[in-house]
Amino acid sequence: MQDPAGGERRPRRLPAMGFSIILLLCVIGLSQAAIEKIFNGTECVPHSQPWQVGLFEGTQLRCGGVLIDRRWVLTAAHCNGSRYWVRLGEHSLSGLDWTEQIRRSGFSATHPGYHGAQHSHDHDLRLLRLGLPIRITHSVQPLPLPTSCVEAGTRCHISGWGTTNHPWSPFPDRLQCLSLSIVPDTTCQDVFPGRITGNMVCAGGVAGADACQGDSGGPLVCDGVLQGLVSWGSVGPCGQDGIPGVYTKICNYVGWIKTVMRNN
Ligand code: ARG
């Protein structure tokens, strides 16, 4: 893929900075148990999801996220840490891929309609601005926002380092990918009566085809654009047959996202 931004090129950063990033990665890597493999997801082709972001507090993975611009990451509003280490260009979290870029999140904007997961999960999205813009490479690239909403039945995929079999089993070391289909709103409303708003899109609902804890804020990608963010789902084990995962419906928010990016 090509550099879509084309725009300004930054001067090469000091070698010392590269070195300190490598050092940091080694420390982080050693502290992470190298445990593979989550249920039903499969390891992504390395760097095939160059927009995938890991949000960390120290060495703890808190959430996923999506790079949508050289300076902006989209995640779920319930990923409400104040400042994250934003890790991009990752595949193996413990190993050095030589493609990593690390940024600190600074300014953020939670959607003003979000009133907490307890309330309704409605408007579950948050924009994070990176301290420094990323360098666009083969392994770090923004994902386009949608120009229309997605239809039921569309094949899409999700990715993340969250667990996919059981809420608190260990996180996998390598990025996991899973393809699934968009579920009709009516089906999803039957599963979660009174809880599905027009700002949610459901996907999966086939045994094993689900996101899970740690995947939140990560992308639901359909036809090469961002259609959802991992938001919520079944209580108890993820990936139960007949229970879809629920995603923030991004096509409803393109205007808000662009306004926040423009004004900040
Ligand atoms: N809220 C979870 C997180 O913070 C994501 C849960 C998604 N669950 C599901 N069954 N799809 O990581």
Image (tube, helix red, strand yellow):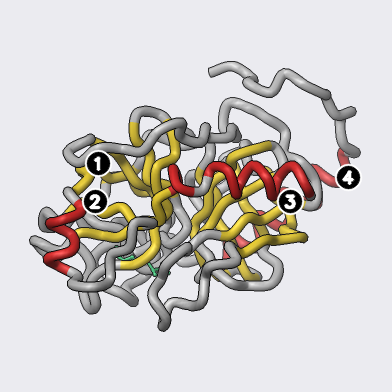
Q: Earlier in the sequence, mark 3 or mark 1?
A: 3
Judging depth in this view, the residue of 66 and 114 nearest the camera is 114
The residue under label 4 is which amino acid type?
Answer: Ala
Question: Between marks 3 and 1, how big is the CA–CA gap?
Answer: 29 Å
Residue sitting at x 22%, y 78%: 236
Q: Which residue is mark 1?
A: 179
Horizontal relation, residue 171 to residue 31: left or right: left
Judging depth in this view, the residue of 154 and 185 nearest the camera is 185
Q: Secondary structure at mark 4?
A: helix
The reply to whether discs 3 and 1 touch (Cβ–Cβ < 8 Å) is: no
Question: Between marks 3 and 4, how big is the CA–CA gap?
Answer: 20 Å
Q: Which residue is mark 4?
A: 16
Residue 186 quadrant = bottom left
The reply to whether discs 2 and 1 touch (Cβ–Cβ < 8 Å) is: no
Residue 166 quadrant = bottom left
Q: Which residue is mark 2?
A: 203
Q: Which residue is mark 3?
A: 130
Ligand 1 closer than 8 Å to the CB at disc 4?
A: no
Q: Earlier in the sequence, mark 1 or mark 4?
A: 4
The residue under label 3 is which amino acid type?
Answer: Leu
Judging depth in this view, the residue of 148 and 235 nearest the camera is 148
Q: Secondary structure at mark 1?
A: strand
Foreground label between 2 and 1:
2
Foreground label between 2 and 3:
2
> Is residue 175 in sight in this rendering?
no
- Callout 3: 10 Å neighbours few (<14), some, many (20+)? many
- Callout 4: 10 Å neighbours few (<14), some, many (20+)? few
Q: Secondary structure at mark 3?
A: strand
Foreground label between 1 and 4:
1
Relative to 90, residue 231 above or below: below
Horizontal relation, residue 239 to residue 247: left or right: left
Foreground label between 3 and 4:
3
